[in-house]
Amino acid sequence: MTQELTFAVIIIGILHSGIRLATPYLYAGLGEMFDQRAGVLNLGVDGIMLMGAFFGFYAVYQTGNAWLGVAAAVLVGIVMGLLMAVVSISFQAEQGISGIGLYMFGLGLSSLLFKTMLGTVEGVQGFSELKFQITQNFSLYDIPIIGPIFFNHSVLTYGAFLLVPISAYVLNKTTWGLKIKAAGQNPEAADSLGVNVTTVRYMTVILGAALAGLAGASLSISLLNIFQENMTNGMGFIAVALVYFGSWRPYGVLAGALLFSTVNALQLWAQVLNLPIPSDVAVMLPYLLTIIALAMPFRRAAQPAALTRPFTRGDN
Amino acid sequence: MKKRYLLLSLLLIVALTLVACGGNAATKAPKPEPTKSSEAHPTKASEPPVASGEKFRVAVVLPSTITDMAWSQALIDSLKRIQEKMGGEDKMEIAYTENMWNVTDAASAIRDYADGGYNLVIAHGTQYGASLFEIAPDFPDTSFAWGTATDTGKDKGVENVFAYEARAEQGGFVLGVLASALDKTGVLGVVGPVEAGDAKLYIDGFAAGAKYDKPDVKVNISYTGSFGDTALAAEAANTHISAGADVLTGSAQQVVGAIGVAKEKGVLWIGTQSDQSSLAPDTVVASQIYVWDGPFQDMINKHMSGVMGGETYALTLENGGLVLKYADWADKDAVAKAEQVKQMIVDGDLNVMDVIEGKAAPAMSGDEVSTGATRFEYPAEIKPVRIVMVLPSTITDLSWSQSLYDSVKDLQDHYGKDVIDFAYTENMWNVTDAAAALRDYADSGYDIVIAHGAQYGDTLFELAPDYPDTSFAWGTTTNFGADEGVTNVFAYEPRADQGGYVLGVIAAKLTKSGVVGVVGPIDAGDAKLHVDGFVAGVHATKPDAKVNISFTGNFGDTSLAAEAANTQISAGADVLTGSAQQVVGAIGVAKDKGVPWLGIQGDQSSVAPDTVVATDLYDWRPTILAMIQARSGGVLGGKVLQLTLANGGQRMIYSDKLPADVVEAAKAAEKGIIDGSIEIKAEPR
């Protein structure tokens, strides 16, 4: 009666889980990457994610329309980003501290709103997993092995992966991307060449926060379809770490997110398969691997020179 | 560059604290503001125990939120019901702080609450214990409570602490039976937080219950390492479903993520701690709900009558602290089956902990053959006693010494440390050293001194007359010193020929080659009895089978025992048995070669669960209790105490790897030995 656990079933399970789990890390990580390339460290990602998760969820809960949920999450992300930008760019507050403040704010407010507006954990019908029905009898999902791994995810997951080349293009091939990098590398020089550093930083912080909001929504209306207080459980901080891991490059962030989530999927399977590893060690694996990868000497790419440094015109 | 690494380490620390350490939430404010009432804080000195008519004030420190649908919510729901019963907010105030995953913050919250004059301060988590015992003595007029725990701090001199626990394995067991009855694929999935506390109890119970109903069901368990990681819990649920599970369960607040997945994939969910059916009414087929009303109402009453602590509470199925709720669409037959098991637990006919620990043979499906053996029961009350053991090997030897240690430890766990106090010395293979140890122990006032080996006899008879109020015991022997004129020595003897005979029957049934092997230590004591019985059992079942016996001449030479096993297998043996602590070596070989092993003395299945197919376990509890009770009646020795199948001193454990007809034959042999229809005769060797 027991279903035979073939090697294929296990591999499909691990890879499918790994891809799906990477979704929130990708959105949040890529967004944070833009912030940092422009010279702003935003440690409030987790708080923004929670706000995005709550508003995304609440919009779907009220209207039943998943796309409205995405809009709500992005919108609340923009508001949170604006807050961060005002405090850390205009008022030039210490970025590390204001980020933590934003995190606390998002965590507390999303919990409070949850208690007053929902009161209990509820479920919604969010984005479901696509099967890519091509014809009546054929869907991409039916392709052996490849299908169940790659063609069975929600639209937000595909969006997250699509965002990687888009980010790379924006950063490396557009004028705006150049301005971002200049603002983060040498804001004074950029300013002397007519780049409005403050505007660029405002825009990237808001963009990053919008993506963080979307990351939260990917949890609450796509992966889990519920909202619970502090449901991100520190994912936002992992996302910040992934930016360092990925050396401030979109494909680096992708590699980090996939490594982290795949090892996480791997450890879950290791337990199910009853491999002789204590559960405590298994759950440690993803973090252990991340630390090892971070410690590798060849990863020492240059971080944006002006990261965490506020910019004032004519300051020098 | 430097700054980057500093920042990076900071980040990692924050991230790891939040995620890896099971942190389930963050504080909303670094410093909690516990007192929500506007009245001025009374000082602790002027705060008397609440008088009737006055408002009773309860404060709770919670590790997660009151809407977590799990651990914290269950408590708050109960407190609110008590509040209603007591007459609303005017009669009872409930203040709480959520998300206290940081123990230092929690400690300051606990102190603030106590300072604020609350009558009962509840620290709702095992992690708060250390802080509680530091704070409690400073506020003698305040009652404190914590759980899951059984320690009220009595031995630390703390008198105002209550402890509470949920025997989650009970409901878990019933729900495991339900799950396997509902299951169609043969696979169940469990999403656990960390392997500890009530989560571990629940999951152990669940797995045991599932296997109790259907021995071949597969229970896949994964722990997320966190209480609040909803996304990982969801992924774990997905993983279980990919692995074929069609009924899932799990615990802690993280499970809402898993329930969502269960709902989407159309598999069933079984909940625990709180009622989770509101989240997915068509998915949650049953829940175990913690009802804390009884314990906390009692704490409040006790506090009002001036008793500040010292009591331990446990939620059980019997006392109504654990409530099982089934969905009205749940399969009626499965629910009936679960309820039947629940009744057995409530009536005391089934001890879940024993099943989990493999002490009671699980049996529900299949015909239960009654063997007529006495089932072990704890006498309601025994006199406090101090026991000491001198052991020839270690308490982890999986055989002779461990079986005695485990039994005494079990009695202590049952009756408490103030009733059974014990000490032991291991590795006393040197008889002169043992003699010195025995005298030391007798000198320091132990009631029962056990010399656990036939080699200690001479010493004991020299010693015993000098300590007439002390009982001594030794074995394997039948000599209690009548010839020497001593009256305070017990002799004990495991009748290993009985269990050995049953194992022999099994060996004869299992062997295909017609050759079975024995790896013995020396041909004496219970090892000799074991071999005698084993040979008789084999030949009674299969007269032409060959039994090869090799003694290593040693109790502890593991490598030699391994070599012996190798040799036996080369000689054609396809079933092995053996005794003494050396056998772990032989079991390793048996495992490598795919040969079944029949164990005796201790339960050796942990070494090779698939290899050790049956065990004759020495259960010393009836023997120890017989000594304690004899002493209560003024008899200090002069008796032979036997461990037999009939009196429960030996217990057969059959693995689920054993074919049903073999178990049946073995049980028939047990029955025959107990009712006397089988007489075991040692063959000349």
Image (tube, coloured by chain):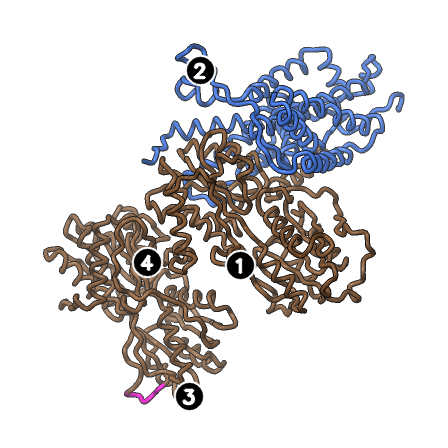
The relative height of residue A239 versus residue B635 in the rendered view (above or below) is above
What residue is shown with label 2? A140
Q: CA distance from mark 2 to mark 1?
A: 54 Å
Disc 3 on helix, strand or loop? Answer: helix
Q: Mark 1 — residue?
A: B314
Give, as a single range, the part of the protein colored magenta.
B483-487
Closest to the camera, between mark 1 and mark 4, is: 1
Label whose residue precedes the other's in the sequence (1 or 4): 1
Discs 3/4, front: 3
Q: Quadrant of residue B148?
A: bottom right
Q: Residue A46 at x, y = what percent?
A: 67, 33
Q: Which mark is residue B466?
A: 3
Mark 2 Cα shell of 10 Å, populated few (<14), some (14-19), many (≥20): some
Report the amino acid beneath label 3: Asp
The answer to whether the residue labelled 2 contacts the one labelled 1, judged by CB atoms less than 8 Å apart, is: no
Q: Quadrant of the C terminus of chain A?
A: top right
Q: Nearer the viewer, residue B145 or B516?
A: B145
- Chain coloured brown in this rendering: B
Kind of residue indicated by mark 1: Ala
Residue B558: mark in rendering: 4
Total number of numbered discs in the rendering: 4
Quarter of the image for residue A118 reads top right
Same subunit, labels 3 and 4: the answer reads yes
> Label 4 vs label 2: CA separation?
58 Å
Residue A121, percent across and down?
Answer: 60, 36
Residue drawn 68% across the image and 23% down it: A72
Closer to the camera in the image, B626 or B467: B626
Q: Chain of mark 1?
A: B
Which amino acid type is shown beneath numbered disc 4? Answer: Thr
The chain holding disc 4 is B
